[in-house]
Amino acid sequence: MYSPWTSERDALLIKSTNNKLPIPKIIEELGGILSRSAIEHRRRKLGIHGHIQSPWNDEKIERLKFLWAGGWSCSQIAADVGDVSRNAVIGKVHRLGLPERVVGAGNGRPRRVSLAPRKPRKPRKSRAKTRLDIVLELPFISQDDLQIAFEQRKTFMELENHHCRWAVGDPAKEDFFFCGAQKVDGLSYCAGHARMAYVAPRRRW
């Protein structure tokens, strides 16, 4: 199994640890292909107990306090300070005991700034298709009721679940019939008659 660790990298890791280099610098020395967790795991395996330098120094902490008091968000502070994440800023604010802030929201009412990590938003549930949605997806078919084949036409007693229920003619007359074509799933009519039955409402001005 391939391992990124070679005897040369092990020696460089030991040397960098003895020189108390910070993790970002060690990653750079090793070619930038190894993560922080990989380096810490290799240290434990080699029995090296080096001091892991914190990304926070006095200058960054003072900058954090200044920006926090100025109302900057945790993401903005992380980008300004550099080499730290938003969660690292939140953790440092907690450890320093900095007060929560109340800043103005867009509607003019104050809102409290939360220090809790952001929760991923739940994806919105897709809206169930309406009959109109189904119709609008159908290809346009020119429909002439007088051209419906006689063998396709159905009486009320002959209708089955899969037949189009488009009525043609006067129900009081003998030549009254239903279309009888294969209906579209979810609708009562075939593709041609569905376009005629379900029409989008006109916008009222």
Image (cartoon, helix red, strand yellow):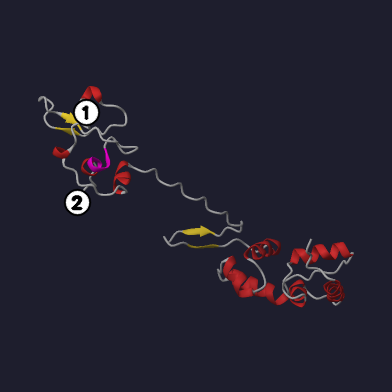
Region rendered in magenta: 190-194
**In x, y percent, where is residue 170?**
11, 29
199 on left or right of 101? left
Which residue position is annotated with label 2? 204
Which residue is farthest left? 173
Tell me which residue sits at (25%, 49%) in the image: 140
Q: Is residue 48 magenta?
A: no
Amino acid under label 2? Arg
**Up-down: is 174 above or below 27?**
above
Front in this rendered view, residue 63 or 13 = 13
Nearer to us of marks 1 and 2 is: 1
73 on left or right of 12? left
Which residue is farthest right? 47
Element type where label 2 sits in the image: loop
Mark seen at residue 154:
1
Mark seen at residue 179:
none
Q: In which quarter of the view is residue 29 placed?
A: bottom right
**Up-down: is 113 above or below 161?**
below
Amino acid under label 1? Lys
79 on left or right of 47? left
